[in-house]
Image (cartoon, rainbow, N blue to C red):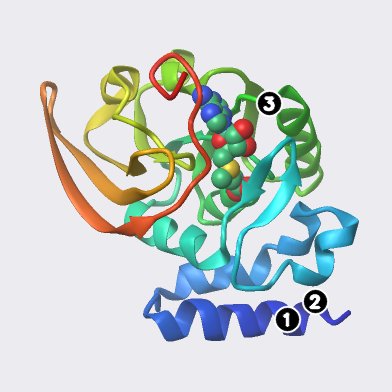
Amino acid sequence: MDFDALRERMVSEQILQRGIEEPKILEAFRAVERHLFVSEQNRKFAYEDYPLPIGENQTISQPYIVALMTQHLEVGESQKVLEVGTGSGYQAAILSYLGASVYSIERVPALAQKAKLLLDSLKCKVEVKAGDSTLGWPQNAPYDRIIVTAASPAVSPCWIEQLKVEGRMVIPLGGPLQQELTVVKKISVSKIDKEVVCACMFVPLLGEYGYK
Ligand code: SAM
């Protein structure tokens, strides 16, 4: 299959035509080979307009959602990003391409291990560990940005604590079946501000401050 052509079509029809025009973001989606992040049998669907299974009952998000979250994260060169839910590692690879240093946590050890091997082989600036990311990763805090890629009932107090003042977080907030993609800004040590972007659907965040 001509994955380069499929990827170019994905960028043009699913991302650019839906209003995400930032050149650096488009470049990242052209550069990162999404088909490497899915199983052999799903490669032919890697550039389609929907999420795909990655094993362990988990998914790699729809390309447009990854692009939308990336746009709202407003990540800058050399910024430190905490990613909640490594999954396949695709979102982390996009953020690394944009110049961020990414610290990513995945609850399912087998997925964490697989993503780590792939991200290392692609020379991405991503550290992966297995664990409950609702507790954050205090050893590398504070973070300029936090991106949560699973449905969250609330903003974990650990994330607020580990986010820099003036930092931002992109997070699907709501029930396990439907959420609102939300941008959370940390205004001061004790104050956050929330802005809803759109409705969305993610797999649930499980853990101490997630769903039980
Ligand atoms: N960002 C991923 C990608 O690019 O492929 C997609 C993530 S998938 C939609 C959500 C992931 O969050 C799943 O892999 C799931 O196992 C993980 N997850 C759920 N609860 C978690 C937790 N408390 N800590 C870390 N990962 C968690």
Q: Relative to the observer, which residue lies in front, 161 or 173?
A: 173
Q: Residue at x 67, y 62 (%)?
A: 32
**Ligand 1, image quadrant it occupies:** top right
Residue 1 picture quarter: bottom right
Mark 1: secondary structure: helix
CA gap between label 2 and label 3 equals: 29 Å
Amino acid at the residue labelled 2: Phe
Mark 2: secondary structure: helix
Q: Can residue 173 be seen in this view?
A: yes
Q: Can residue 33 be seen in this view?
A: no
Respond yes or no on whether mark 3 lies under 8 Å from ligand 1. Answer: yes
CA gap between label 1 and label 2 equals: 5 Å
The residue indicated by pointer 2 is: 3
Marks 3 and 1, the one that precedes in the sequence: 1
The residue indicated by pointer 3 is: 108
Q: Are marks 1 and 2 in contact (CB under 8 Å)?
A: yes
Amino acid at the residue labelled 3: Val
CA gap between label 3 and label 1 equals: 30 Å
- Residue 161 is situated, as x and y percent measured from the top left of the image, at 27, 19
In this view, the mark in front (2 or 3):
3
In this view, the mark in front (3 or 1):
3
